[in-house]
Image: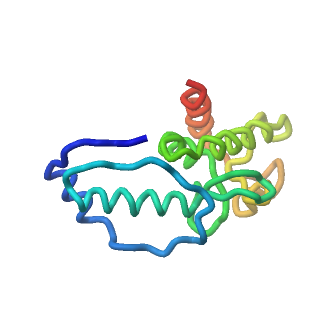
Amino acid sequence: MRISFAATCAFCVVAASLPAGAASPGKPEATSELTLDCSEPRLVDAFNWAKKQALAFAFDGDPVGPWYEAALPGREAFCMRDVAHQAMGAHALGLTRHTRNMLHRFAENISESRDWCSYWEIDRYNRPAPVDYKNDAQFWYCLPANYNILNTYYKMYV
């Protein structure tokens, strides 16, 4: 996929305000053919930096299956709200297989014992994230996230 447009001053300000570099969490295991063609080189640089960062958080080969970090940094997990917000960008980057797997993990963990809730956050080992889950009676729950994730299922289907 190729994105092409002429830059405006607003885009230049955004590109100029991004940090020059950031530490990546590890070796990226994913690649993407998504490119940006623009008359403003700083915007292209910012896009390339953001793409590299996003791909550095995509993983394969863990017990949970293909996934990308979509939670607070360092948790090695993905949560409903963040997956819902990142799914479309991940799709553009070619991480559809990752998103599909993550959405499947939420769906398969819906349980009557949790009042028909899934886990809010799932880690790379395919477990509920320990910081948010003690047992089926004591766990983090965010009602609006259920609607966010349902909308994401639909968007990804379309």
Residue 80 sits in which quadrant?
Answer: top right
Q: At 44% across and 47% down in the image, what residue appears?
A: 34
Above or below, 5 against 124 in this view is above
Q: Position of residue 16 (x, y in %)?
A: 23, 64
Q: Can you tell which quarter of the image residue 73 is in? A: bottom right
Q: Residue at x 60, y 41 (%)?
A: 96
As drawn, the residue found furthest toward the left would be 9
The quarter of the image holding the C terminus is top right
Scheme by which the image is coloured: rainbow
150 vs 89: above or below? above
Q: Position of residue 100 (x, y in %)?
A: 67, 39
The residue at the point 70 percent across, 51 percent down is 66
Residue, far top: 158
Please state, as top left, top right, bottom left or bottom right, where the N terminus lies in the image: top left
Along the viewing direction, whichever of 127 and 64 lies nearer the viewer: 64
Nearer to us in this view, 42 or 135: 42
Residue 86, image x, y percentages: 51, 46
Q: Position of residue 5 (x, y in %)?
A: 24, 42
Q: Is residue 55 left or right of residue 120?
A: left
Residue extending furthest right?
Answer: 113
- Residue at x 55%, y 41% (from the top left corner): 84
Count of numbered labels shown in the rendering? 0
Lateral position of residue 69 relative to residue 18, left or right: right
Residues 109 and 17: in front is 17
